[in-house]
Image (cartoon, rainbow, N blue to C red):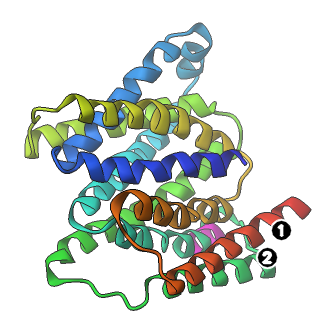
Amino acid sequence: MQALFVTLLWSTSWVLIKFGLKDIPAVTFAGLRYMLAFLCLLPFALQPGQRDALRRLTKADWGQLALLGVLYYAVTQGAMFVGLAYLPALTVSLLLNFTTLIVAFMGIGFLSEKPTPLQWVGVAAFIVGLLIYFYPINIPSGQVFGIAVVLLCVLANSASSILGRYVNRGGRLQPFTVTFVSMGVGAGLLMAGGAASQGLPHISPVNWLYIAWLAVVNTAFAFTLWNHTLRTLPAMESSIINGTMLIQIALLAWLFLGEAITVQTGIGMALAGGGALVVQLRKNRT
């Protein structure tokens, strides 16, 4: 339930990001979001217990968390913002949900988390649902750059899912520590990249409200809770749950962005949601 709640928060981010991208350059927007979120976590990191946890980190821990920050925040989130600047929200959502297949196969090789036959059925239903939902996929030539950026986002997101599971599954590192360190690295890179390539534009009070909500609720709080769920949730299952954002984003896009839901897309959403449910029901039996 915690993981599903996090995806609900993250789904609202897509609408807020699309609104903010009308006035704020993509990488700068992403950098402001995650840097503000990092600053929100800073007072908690200065508490005695958290300072002790940071001091106990080994060189290997720092390296893994820094790499997680590069993959999950700087590359994945930065590329997602850029993709949303060039593509419709539902197109980006479709491409990102192919992370599920990549994580499934990477999890076998790197984490020895072999899916059960029933889970493979769930994955198949999920992917078929995605294909039905978006068929036919007509991409205008002007969106080729956006697609390339989102494909980079998919690869980085898949790698960060495996690395995040590896970092969290032993329970040795606190979820807050994982979030704080990795987010600090990623936010710093995003801010530097955004300032160098796009600068810092004038930001209206409304856009500051978008940034503040995204930073405090949908980032600082949500990412900490997500890292906590990764302690017990296998990589493929966490990816499947994350993939239910397709349905949530579709509904929000319909309500706030004017992207209609047809009978075909409704069937696709039902199959995708059913696949995610099958994976979760199997988990509850074991």
Q: Residue 28 at x, y = what percent?
A: 20, 41
Task: Check disc 2: other Cα within 10 Å, few if <14, some if 14-19, many if 20+.
Answer: few
Q: Using the image as rendered, state which of residue 173 and residue 131 is in the foreground.
A: 131
Residue 29 included in the magenta stretch of the image: no
Q: Total marks drawn?
A: 2
Task: Label 1, secondary structure: give it.
Answer: helix
Which residue is under mark 1? 282
Name the residue: 29% across, 57% down: 79
Residue 267 lies, in percent from the top left, at 59, 83
Query: Is residue 225 shown above or below 130?
Result: above
* Residue appearing at x 68%, y 69% in the figure: 276
**Is residue 71 among the parts visible in the rendering?**
no
**Going by the image, does 119 lie left or right of 109?**
right
Q: Nearest the camera: 73 or 248? A: 248
Q: Is residue 138 above or below residue 10?
A: below
Q: Is residue 244 left or right of residue 205?
A: right
Q: Residue beneath label 2, please?
A: 116
Q: Mark 1 or mark 2, which has the lower sequence index?
A: 2
Depicted 12 relative to depicted 104: above or below: above
Dot 2 amino acid type? Thr
Q: Write down the region rendered in magenta.
A: 105-109
Q: Considering the image in quadrants, where does the C terminus appear?
A: bottom right
Residue with the most extreme bottom position? 136
Circles 1 and 2: CB distance less than 8 Å? yes
Q: Position of residue 48 (x, y in %)?
A: 59, 8
Question: Which element is circle 2 on?
Answer: loop
Outermost top residue: 48
Residue at 46 percent across and 22 percent down: it is 41
Residue 124, image x and y in percent? Answer: 65, 84
Mark 1: which amino acid? Arg
